[in-house]
Image (cartoon, grey):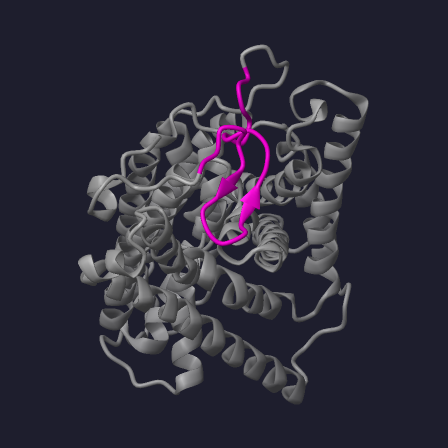
Protein backbone atom coordinates (compact mmCIF):
# COMPACT_ATOMS: atom_id res chain seq x y z
CA UNK A 1 0.00 0.00 0.00
CA UNK A 2 1.00 3.62 -0.40
CA UNK A 3 3.01 5.30 2.32
CA UNK A 4 1.15 8.47 3.17
CA UNK A 5 3.08 9.47 6.29
CA UNK A 6 4.95 12.17 4.43
CA UNK A 7 1.96 13.13 2.32
CA UNK A 8 -0.52 13.67 5.10
CA UNK A 9 1.63 13.76 8.24
CA UNK A 10 1.12 11.76 11.43
CA UNK A 11 1.15 8.03 12.06
CA UNK A 12 0.59 5.30 9.53
CA UNK A 13 -2.76 5.83 7.81
CA UNK A 14 -5.65 3.50 8.34
CA UNK A 15 -6.11 2.19 4.80
CA UNK A 16 -9.67 1.30 3.95
CA UNK A 17 -8.78 -1.43 1.44
CA UNK A 18 -10.19 -4.82 2.29
CA UNK A 19 -8.62 -8.03 1.03
CA UNK A 20 -11.45 -8.83 -1.37
CA UNK A 21 -11.05 -5.47 -3.13
CA UNK A 22 -13.90 -3.50 -1.56
CA UNK A 23 -12.91 0.13 -1.14
CA UNK A 24 -14.41 2.24 1.63
CA UNK A 25 -12.52 5.50 1.77
CA UNK A 26 -15.50 7.41 3.07
CA UNK A 27 -18.81 6.64 4.68
CA UNK A 28 -20.63 4.08 2.52
CA UNK A 29 -18.45 4.78 -0.54
CA UNK A 30 -17.88 1.34 -2.09
CA UNK A 31 -16.42 0.22 -5.38
CA UNK A 32 -16.20 -3.52 -5.82
CA UNK A 33 -13.86 -5.56 -7.96
CA UNK A 34 -10.13 -5.67 -8.51
CA UNK A 35 -8.18 -2.93 -6.77
CA UNK A 36 -6.56 -1.80 -10.02
CA UNK A 37 -8.89 -0.72 -12.83
CA UNK A 38 -7.67 -3.37 -15.28
CA UNK A 39 -6.24 -5.91 -12.83
CA UNK A 40 -3.57 -8.42 -13.87
CA UNK A 41 -3.36 -8.37 -17.66
CA UNK A 42 -0.65 -11.00 -18.12
CA UNK A 43 -2.82 -13.53 -19.97
CA UNK A 44 -5.29 -11.16 -21.58
CA UNK A 45 -5.70 -10.57 -25.30
CA UNK A 46 -6.20 -6.81 -24.98
CA UNK A 47 -3.75 -5.08 -22.64
CA UNK A 48 -4.42 -1.52 -21.54
CA UNK A 49 -1.58 -0.76 -19.12
CA UNK A 50 1.09 -0.11 -21.73
CA UNK A 51 1.85 3.63 -21.54
CA UNK A 52 5.10 5.17 -20.36
CA UNK A 53 5.02 8.57 -18.68
CA UNK A 54 6.60 10.09 -21.80
CA UNK A 55 3.73 8.88 -23.99
CA UNK A 56 1.19 10.07 -21.44
CA UNK A 57 2.84 13.50 -21.54
CA UNK A 58 2.51 13.50 -25.33
CA UNK A 59 -1.16 12.52 -25.08
CA UNK A 60 -1.80 15.28 -22.55
CA UNK A 61 -0.08 17.89 -24.72
CA UNK A 62 -1.91 16.75 -27.86
CA UNK A 63 -5.22 16.99 -26.01
CA UNK A 64 -4.73 20.32 -24.21
CA UNK A 65 -2.37 22.41 -26.35
CA UNK A 66 -4.70 22.47 -29.32
CA UNK A 67 -6.94 25.17 -30.70
CA UNK A 68 -7.25 26.55 -27.14
CA UNK A 69 -3.90 28.23 -27.74
CA UNK A 70 -5.31 30.09 -30.72
CA UNK A 71 -7.90 31.92 -28.59
CA UNK A 72 -5.42 33.37 -26.10
CA UNK A 73 -4.21 36.41 -28.10
CA UNK A 74 -7.80 37.66 -28.45
CA UNK A 75 -8.11 37.69 -24.65
CA UNK A 76 -5.25 40.18 -24.54
CA UNK A 77 -7.23 42.38 -26.88
CA UNK A 78 -9.94 42.69 -24.22
CA UNK A 79 -8.10 42.81 -20.88
CA UNK A 80 -4.69 43.96 -22.13
CA UNK A 81 -1.42 42.19 -22.83
CA UNK A 82 -0.03 42.29 -19.29
CA UNK A 83 -3.11 40.96 -17.43
CA UNK A 84 -3.51 38.25 -20.06
CA UNK A 85 0.07 37.02 -19.61
CA UNK A 86 -0.19 37.16 -15.82
CA UNK A 87 -3.38 35.10 -15.97
CA UNK A 88 -1.87 32.53 -18.34
CA UNK A 89 1.16 32.00 -16.09
CA UNK A 90 -0.90 31.94 -12.89
CA UNK A 91 -3.37 29.42 -14.27
CA UNK A 92 -0.49 27.28 -15.50
CA UNK A 93 0.93 27.16 -11.98
CA UNK A 94 -2.53 26.63 -10.52
CA UNK A 95 -3.16 23.81 -13.00
CA UNK A 96 0.09 22.15 -11.92
CA UNK A 97 -1.05 22.24 -8.30
CA UNK A 98 -4.45 20.74 -9.09
CA UNK A 99 -2.79 18.13 -11.33
CA UNK A 100 -0.69 17.10 -8.33
CA UNK A 101 -3.81 16.70 -6.19
CA UNK A 102 -5.51 14.63 -8.90
CA UNK A 103 -2.50 12.36 -9.31
CA UNK A 104 -2.20 11.78 -5.56
CA UNK A 105 -5.89 10.93 -5.38
CA UNK A 106 -5.47 8.42 -8.20
CA UNK A 107 -2.47 6.81 -6.48
CA UNK A 108 -4.48 6.52 -3.27
CA UNK A 109 -7.43 5.03 -5.16
CA UNK A 110 -6.14 2.82 -8.00
CA UNK A 111 -9.71 1.62 -8.66
CA UNK A 112 -10.60 5.09 -9.99
CA UNK A 113 -10.74 5.16 -13.79
CA UNK A 114 -12.57 8.44 -14.42
CA UNK A 115 -14.20 11.40 -12.72
CA UNK A 116 -17.35 9.34 -12.20
CA UNK A 117 -15.46 6.83 -10.05
CA UNK A 118 -13.93 9.70 -8.09
CA UNK A 119 -17.37 11.24 -7.63
CA UNK A 120 -18.60 7.91 -6.23
CA UNK A 121 -15.89 7.97 -3.57
CA UNK A 122 -16.60 11.58 -2.65
CA UNK A 123 -20.37 11.84 -2.94
CA UNK A 124 -21.81 8.36 -3.53
CA UNK A 125 -24.15 7.37 -6.36
CA UNK A 126 -25.24 10.93 -7.19
CA UNK A 127 -21.62 12.04 -7.46
CA UNK A 128 -20.83 9.18 -9.81
CA UNK A 129 -23.73 9.89 -12.14
CA UNK A 130 -23.22 13.66 -12.25
CA UNK A 131 -19.46 13.55 -12.82
CA UNK A 132 -19.73 10.68 -15.32
CA UNK A 133 -22.39 12.50 -17.32
CA UNK A 134 -20.37 15.71 -17.14
CA UNK A 135 -17.28 13.95 -18.48
CA UNK A 136 -19.16 12.48 -21.45
CA UNK A 137 -20.97 15.73 -22.21
CA UNK A 138 -17.81 17.84 -22.02
CA UNK A 139 -15.84 15.32 -24.11
CA UNK A 140 -18.54 15.29 -26.82
CA UNK A 141 -18.67 19.09 -26.88
CA UNK A 142 -14.88 19.27 -26.98
CA UNK A 143 -14.88 16.88 -29.94
CA UNK A 144 -17.37 19.16 -31.65
CA UNK A 145 -15.09 22.11 -30.95
CA UNK A 146 -12.25 20.33 -32.72
CA UNK A 147 -14.55 19.55 -35.65
CA UNK A 148 -15.30 23.27 -35.94
CA UNK A 149 -11.57 24.01 -35.82
CA UNK A 150 -11.11 21.53 -38.65
CA UNK A 151 -13.96 23.17 -40.53
CA UNK A 152 -12.27 26.56 -40.28
CA UNK A 153 -8.94 25.11 -41.36
CA UNK A 154 -10.40 23.36 -44.41
CA UNK A 155 -12.45 26.40 -45.42
CA UNK A 156 -9.28 28.54 -45.37
CA UNK A 157 -7.28 25.96 -47.31
CA UNK A 158 -9.92 25.59 -50.03
CA UNK A 159 -11.18 29.19 -50.06
CA UNK A 160 -14.67 28.19 -48.81
CA UNK A 161 -15.57 26.49 -52.07
CA UNK A 162 -17.80 23.97 -50.30
CA UNK A 163 -20.58 24.25 -47.76
CA UNK A 164 -19.12 24.59 -44.26
CA UNK A 165 -21.24 21.67 -43.12
CA UNK A 166 -19.52 19.48 -45.70
CA UNK A 167 -16.11 20.51 -44.39
CA UNK A 168 -17.23 19.48 -40.91
CA UNK A 169 -18.45 16.14 -42.23
CA UNK A 170 -15.20 15.54 -44.09
CA UNK A 171 -13.23 16.27 -40.92
CA UNK A 172 -15.45 13.99 -38.83
CA UNK A 173 -14.50 10.87 -40.80
CA UNK A 174 -10.76 10.75 -39.92
CA UNK A 175 -11.57 11.90 -36.39
CA UNK A 176 -13.81 8.85 -35.99
CA UNK A 177 -11.19 6.51 -37.48
CA UNK A 178 -8.41 7.77 -35.21
CA UNK A 179 -10.60 7.47 -32.10
CA UNK A 180 -11.38 3.79 -32.82
CA UNK A 181 -8.42 1.95 -31.16
CA UNK A 182 -9.48 0.34 -27.87
CA UNK A 183 -6.22 1.20 -26.07
CA UNK A 184 -4.50 4.55 -25.71
CA UNK A 185 -1.05 3.31 -26.74
CA UNK A 186 -2.14 3.41 -30.39
CA UNK A 187 -3.35 6.99 -30.02
CA UNK A 188 -0.20 7.95 -28.12
CA UNK A 189 2.00 7.36 -31.17
CA UNK A 190 -0.40 9.33 -33.34
CA UNK A 191 -0.12 12.12 -30.78
CA UNK A 192 3.59 12.61 -31.53
CA UNK A 193 2.98 14.22 -34.96
CA UNK A 194 -0.01 15.99 -33.41
CA UNK A 195 2.21 17.76 -30.88
CA UNK A 196 4.78 18.58 -33.55
CA UNK A 197 2.06 19.99 -35.81
CA UNK A 198 0.63 22.44 -33.27
CA UNK A 199 4.12 23.54 -32.23
CA UNK A 200 5.21 24.17 -35.82
CA UNK A 201 1.85 25.80 -36.65
CA UNK A 202 2.32 28.16 -33.71
CA UNK A 203 5.80 29.07 -34.91
CA UNK A 204 4.50 29.68 -38.43
CA UNK A 205 1.70 31.84 -36.99
CA UNK A 206 4.14 33.94 -34.97
CA UNK A 207 6.50 34.37 -37.93
CA UNK A 208 3.56 35.34 -40.12
CA UNK A 209 2.40 37.88 -37.56
CA UNK A 210 5.91 39.31 -37.18
CA UNK A 211 6.44 39.68 -40.92
CA UNK A 212 2.92 41.01 -41.56
CA UNK A 213 1.89 43.17 -38.59
CA UNK A 214 -1.52 44.74 -38.93
CA UNK A 215 -1.38 48.43 -39.72
CA UNK A 216 -2.69 50.54 -38.19
CA UNK A 217 -2.88 48.61 -34.97
CA UNK A 218 -3.08 49.23 -31.24
CA UNK A 219 -1.56 46.82 -28.74
CA UNK A 220 -2.73 47.80 -25.27
CA UNK A 221 -0.84 46.70 -22.19
CA UNK A 222 -3.86 47.33 -19.92
CA UNK A 223 -7.57 47.72 -20.70
CA UNK A 224 -10.72 48.24 -18.63
CA UNK A 225 -13.47 46.06 -20.12
CA UNK A 226 -16.93 45.34 -18.74
CA UNK A 227 -17.34 42.36 -16.41
CA UNK A 228 -18.97 40.23 -19.11
CA UNK A 229 -16.29 40.94 -21.71
CA UNK A 230 -13.52 40.53 -19.16
CA UNK A 231 -14.78 37.20 -17.91
CA UNK A 232 -15.28 35.84 -21.42
CA UNK A 233 -11.64 36.66 -22.06
CA UNK A 234 -10.61 35.13 -18.76
CA UNK A 235 -12.36 31.89 -19.66
CA UNK A 236 -10.09 31.48 -22.70
CA UNK A 237 -6.93 30.79 -20.66
CA UNK A 238 -8.99 29.02 -17.98
CA UNK A 239 -10.30 26.48 -20.47
CA UNK A 240 -7.05 26.34 -22.45
CA UNK A 241 -5.83 24.20 -19.53
CA UNK A 242 -9.04 22.16 -19.34
CA UNK A 243 -7.72 18.65 -19.81
CA UNK A 244 -7.56 17.36 -16.26
CA UNK A 245 -10.83 15.45 -16.71
CA UNK A 246 -8.86 12.90 -18.78
CA UNK A 247 -6.01 12.43 -16.30
CA UNK A 248 -7.55 9.48 -14.44
CA UNK A 249 -8.23 7.65 -17.71
CA UNK A 250 -4.71 8.27 -18.98
CA UNK A 251 -3.02 7.28 -15.71
CA UNK A 252 -5.08 4.07 -15.56
CA UNK A 253 -3.35 2.88 -18.73
CA UNK A 254 0.18 3.62 -17.49
CA UNK A 255 2.62 0.81 -16.77
CA UNK A 256 3.79 2.72 -13.70
CA UNK A 257 1.20 5.24 -12.43
CA UNK A 258 3.69 6.58 -9.89
CA UNK A 259 5.40 8.38 -12.79
CA UNK A 260 2.24 10.34 -13.62
CA UNK A 261 3.50 13.62 -12.15
CA UNK A 262 6.45 13.56 -14.55
CA UNK A 263 3.93 13.65 -17.39
CA UNK A 264 1.90 16.37 -15.66
CA UNK A 265 4.97 18.55 -15.08
CA UNK A 266 6.00 18.12 -18.72
CA UNK A 267 2.53 19.10 -19.87
CA UNK A 268 2.22 22.18 -17.67
CA UNK A 269 5.70 23.50 -18.48
CA UNK A 270 5.18 22.96 -22.20
CA UNK A 271 1.65 24.41 -22.22
CA UNK A 272 2.42 27.45 -20.07
CA UNK A 273 5.55 28.29 -22.09
CA UNK A 274 3.80 27.91 -25.46
CA UNK A 275 0.72 29.82 -24.36
CA UNK A 276 2.74 32.71 -22.95
CA UNK A 277 5.09 33.15 -25.90
CA UNK A 278 2.33 32.72 -28.49
CA UNK A 279 -0.03 35.14 -26.75
CA UNK A 280 2.64 37.83 -26.39
CA UNK A 281 4.06 37.64 -29.92
CA UNK A 282 0.74 37.29 -31.75
CA UNK A 283 -1.05 40.01 -29.78
CA UNK A 284 1.92 42.36 -30.06
CA UNK A 285 2.03 42.23 -33.86
CA UNK A 286 -1.67 41.79 -34.65
CA UNK A 287 -2.99 44.22 -32.07
CA UNK A 288 -6.10 44.37 -29.91
CA UNK A 289 -8.32 43.37 -32.84
CA UNK A 290 -6.75 39.94 -33.27
CA UNK A 291 -9.38 37.34 -34.03
CA UNK A 292 -10.05 34.00 -32.38
CA UNK A 293 -8.65 31.68 -33.74
CA UNK A 294 -5.70 34.03 -34.18
CA UNK A 295 -4.54 32.38 -37.43
CA UNK A 296 -7.57 33.98 -39.08
CA UNK A 297 -5.94 37.41 -38.60
CA UNK A 298 -2.93 36.44 -40.72
CA UNK A 299 -2.60 37.14 -44.45
CA UNK A 300 -4.24 34.37 -46.53
CA UNK A 301 -1.01 32.58 -47.45
CA UNK A 302 0.21 32.49 -43.86
CA UNK A 303 -3.23 31.54 -42.54
CA UNK A 304 -3.41 28.63 -44.96
CA UNK A 305 0.06 27.46 -43.99
CA UNK A 306 -0.64 27.66 -40.26
CA UNK A 307 -4.06 26.01 -40.45
CA UNK A 308 -2.79 23.30 -42.78
CA UNK A 309 0.05 22.39 -40.43
CA UNK A 310 -2.31 22.39 -37.40
CA UNK A 311 -4.82 19.95 -38.93
CA UNK A 312 -3.19 16.79 -37.47
CA UNK A 313 -3.47 18.29 -34.00
CA UNK A 314 -7.15 19.13 -34.45
CA UNK A 315 -7.78 15.57 -35.65
CA UNK A 316 -5.99 13.79 -32.82
CA UNK A 317 -7.35 16.08 -30.11
CA UNK A 318 -10.89 15.44 -31.33
CA UNK A 319 -10.19 11.71 -31.46
CA UNK A 320 -8.89 11.71 -27.89
CA UNK A 321 -12.02 13.43 -26.62
CA UNK A 322 -14.34 11.01 -28.46
CA UNK A 323 -12.26 8.07 -27.24
CA UNK A 324 -12.55 9.35 -23.65
CA UNK A 325 -16.34 9.58 -23.78
CA UNK A 326 -16.64 6.08 -25.27
CA UNK A 327 -14.08 4.58 -22.86
CA UNK A 328 -15.93 5.82 -19.77
CA UNK A 329 -19.18 4.19 -20.83
CA UNK A 330 -17.42 1.04 -22.04
CA UNK A 331 -15.67 0.56 -18.69
CA UNK A 332 -18.94 1.22 -16.89
CA UNK A 333 -20.59 -1.59 -18.87
CA UNK A 334 -17.80 -4.18 -18.93
CA UNK A 335 -15.49 -3.60 -15.95
CA UNK A 336 -14.28 -6.99 -14.65
CA UNK A 337 -15.91 -8.82 -17.57
CA UNK A 338 -14.43 -10.93 -20.35
CA UNK A 339 -15.48 -8.32 -22.93
CA UNK A 340 -13.00 -5.79 -21.54
CA UNK A 341 -9.86 -7.82 -22.22
CA UNK A 342 -10.91 -10.26 -24.94
CA UNK A 343 -11.85 -9.98 -28.62
CA UNK A 344 -15.56 -10.73 -28.23
CA UNK A 345 -18.33 -9.81 -30.64
CA UNK A 346 -20.27 -8.00 -27.93
CA UNK A 347 -17.20 -6.11 -26.78
CA UNK A 348 -16.16 -4.89 -30.20
CA UNK A 349 -19.74 -4.30 -31.29
CA UNK A 350 -20.39 -2.11 -28.25
CA UNK A 351 -17.10 -0.24 -28.67
CA UNK A 352 -17.83 0.43 -32.35
CA UNK A 353 -21.32 1.68 -31.53
CA UNK A 354 -20.01 4.00 -28.80
CA UNK A 355 -17.28 5.49 -31.00
CA UNK A 356 -19.71 6.12 -33.86
CA UNK A 357 -22.27 7.55 -31.43
CA UNK A 358 -19.83 10.02 -29.82
CA UNK A 359 -18.50 11.28 -33.15
CA UNK A 360 -21.96 11.46 -34.69
CA UNK A 361 -23.31 13.40 -31.71
CA UNK A 362 -20.38 15.82 -31.94
CA UNK A 363 -21.01 16.35 -35.66
CA UNK A 364 -24.75 16.92 -35.26
CA UNK A 365 -24.19 19.38 -32.42
CA UNK A 366 -21.46 21.25 -34.31
CA UNK A 367 -23.48 21.77 -37.49
CA UNK A 368 -27.04 21.64 -36.18
CA UNK A 369 -26.94 23.94 -33.15
CA UNK A 370 -26.45 27.58 -34.15
CA UNK A 371 -25.20 28.54 -30.69
CA UNK A 372 -22.88 25.53 -30.36
CA UNK A 373 -19.81 27.66 -29.66
CA UNK A 374 -21.70 29.20 -26.72
CA UNK A 375 -22.77 25.76 -25.52
CA UNK A 376 -19.12 24.70 -25.45
CA UNK A 377 -18.55 27.63 -23.09
CA UNK A 378 -21.45 26.55 -20.89
CA UNK A 379 -20.22 22.95 -20.76
CA UNK A 380 -16.74 24.17 -19.90
CA UNK A 381 -18.11 26.45 -17.19
CA UNK A 382 -20.27 23.73 -15.67
CA UNK A 383 -17.76 20.90 -15.79
CA UNK A 384 -14.20 21.91 -16.74
CA UNK A 385 -14.17 24.49 -13.97
CA UNK A 386 -14.56 21.63 -11.49
CA UNK A 387 -12.50 18.98 -13.27
CA UNK A 388 -9.50 21.24 -13.83
CA UNK A 389 -9.64 23.25 -10.62
CA UNK A 390 -12.38 22.95 -8.01
CA UNK A 391 -12.75 19.24 -7.35
CA UNK A 392 -9.01 18.79 -6.80
CA UNK A 393 -9.43 20.62 -3.51
CA UNK A 394 -12.15 18.16 -2.50
CA UNK A 395 -9.79 15.27 -3.28
CA UNK A 396 -7.18 16.48 -0.81
CA UNK A 397 -9.76 17.30 1.87
CA UNK A 398 -11.29 13.82 1.51
CA UNK A 399 -8.08 11.82 1.62
CA UNK A 400 -6.42 13.81 4.37
CA UNK A 401 -9.59 13.33 6.44
CA UNK A 402 -10.13 9.60 5.85
CA UNK A 403 -6.80 8.02 4.91
CA UNK A 404 -4.78 9.41 7.80
CA UNK A 405 -7.23 8.20 10.41
CA UNK A 406 -6.90 11.61 12.08
CA UNK A 407 -9.95 13.30 10.56
CA UNK A 408 -10.07 17.02 11.37
CA UNK A 409 -6.71 16.85 13.15
CA UNK A 410 -5.09 16.16 9.77
CA UNK A 411 -6.55 19.42 8.44
CA UNK A 412 -5.31 21.33 11.47
CA UNK A 413 -1.80 19.87 11.11
CA UNK A 414 -1.51 20.99 7.48
CA UNK A 415 -3.20 24.38 7.64
CA UNK A 416 -1.65 25.70 4.42
CA UNK A 417 -2.84 22.73 2.36
CA UNK A 418 -6.24 22.94 4.01
CA UNK A 419 -6.61 26.61 3.09
CA UNK A 420 -5.32 26.06 -0.47
CA UNK A 421 -7.71 23.14 -0.96
CA UNK A 422 -10.69 25.13 0.27
CA UNK A 423 -9.74 28.07 -1.95
CA UNK A 424 -9.28 25.70 -4.90
CA UNK A 425 -12.77 24.33 -4.39
CA UNK A 426 -14.16 27.88 -4.07
CA UNK A 427 -12.34 28.94 -7.26
CA UNK A 428 -14.00 26.11 -9.17
CA UNK A 429 -17.38 27.23 -7.89
CA UNK A 430 -16.75 30.85 -8.86
CA UNK A 431 -15.62 29.98 -12.38
CA UNK A 432 -18.63 27.68 -12.78
CA UNK A 433 -21.23 30.22 -11.68
CA UNK A 434 -19.69 33.33 -13.26
CA UNK A 435 -18.81 31.54 -16.49
CA UNK A 436 -22.30 30.12 -16.91
CA UNK A 437 -23.88 33.51 -16.21
CA UNK A 438 -21.66 35.28 -18.73
CA UNK A 439 -22.24 32.74 -21.51
CA UNK A 440 -26.01 32.80 -21.00
CA UNK A 441 -25.88 36.60 -21.14
CA UNK A 442 -24.04 36.42 -24.46
CA UNK A 443 -26.58 33.94 -25.86
CA UNK A 444 -29.45 36.26 -24.94
CA UNK A 445 -27.65 39.23 -26.54
CA UNK A 446 -26.94 37.19 -29.69
CA UNK A 447 -30.61 36.30 -30.12
CA UNK A 448 -31.67 39.89 -29.47
CA UNK A 449 -29.27 41.18 -32.12
CA UNK A 450 -30.37 38.56 -34.65
CA UNK A 451 -26.83 37.29 -35.14
CA UNK A 452 -27.73 33.63 -34.53
CA UNK A 453 -27.78 31.74 -37.86
CA UNK A 454 -30.26 28.96 -38.67
CA UNK A 455 -29.27 25.35 -37.98
CA UNK A 456 -27.48 23.20 -40.60
CA UNK A 457 -26.47 26.29 -42.55
CA UNK A 458 -23.80 26.21 -45.26
Residue 199 appears in the rendering: yes
Image x and y of residue 410, in percent = 25, 55
Residue drawn 65% across the image and 33% down it:
335
Q: Give the range drawn in magenta.
A: 17-41
* Image: 228 above or below 134: below
Q: Quadrant of the N terminus?
A: top left
* Image: 104 above or below 56: below
Residue drawn 50% across the image and 31% down it:
35
Residue drawn 59% across the image and 57% down it:
134
* Image: 183 above or below 23: above
**Nearest the eye: 409 or 399:** 409
**Nearest the eye: 55 or 288:** 55
**Nearest the eye: 121 or 284:** 121
Q: In this view, does 354 lie to the left or right of 99?
A: right
Residue farthest along the top direction in this orientation: 43
Image x and y of residue 328, in percent = 62, 42
Image x and y of residue 442, in percent = 56, 81
Image x and y of residue 438, in percent = 50, 80
- Magenta-drawn stretch contains 428: no
- Magenta-drawn stretch contains 18: yes
Amino acid sequence: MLDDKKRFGGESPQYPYEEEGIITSGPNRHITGELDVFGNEENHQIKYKTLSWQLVAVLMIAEIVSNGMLSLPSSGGVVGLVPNVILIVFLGIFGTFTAYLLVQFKLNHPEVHNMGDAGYILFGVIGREVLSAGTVIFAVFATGGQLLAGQIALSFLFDSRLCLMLYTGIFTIPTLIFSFPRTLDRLSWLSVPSVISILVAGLVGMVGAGLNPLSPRTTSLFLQPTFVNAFVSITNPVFAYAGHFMFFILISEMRNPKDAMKAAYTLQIFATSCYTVFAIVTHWYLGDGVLSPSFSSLPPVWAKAAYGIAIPNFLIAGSLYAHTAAKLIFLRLFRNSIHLHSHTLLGWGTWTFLIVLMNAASFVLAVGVPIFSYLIGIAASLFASWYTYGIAGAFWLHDSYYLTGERIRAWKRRKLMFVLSVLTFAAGGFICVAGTYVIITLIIDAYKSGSVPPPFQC
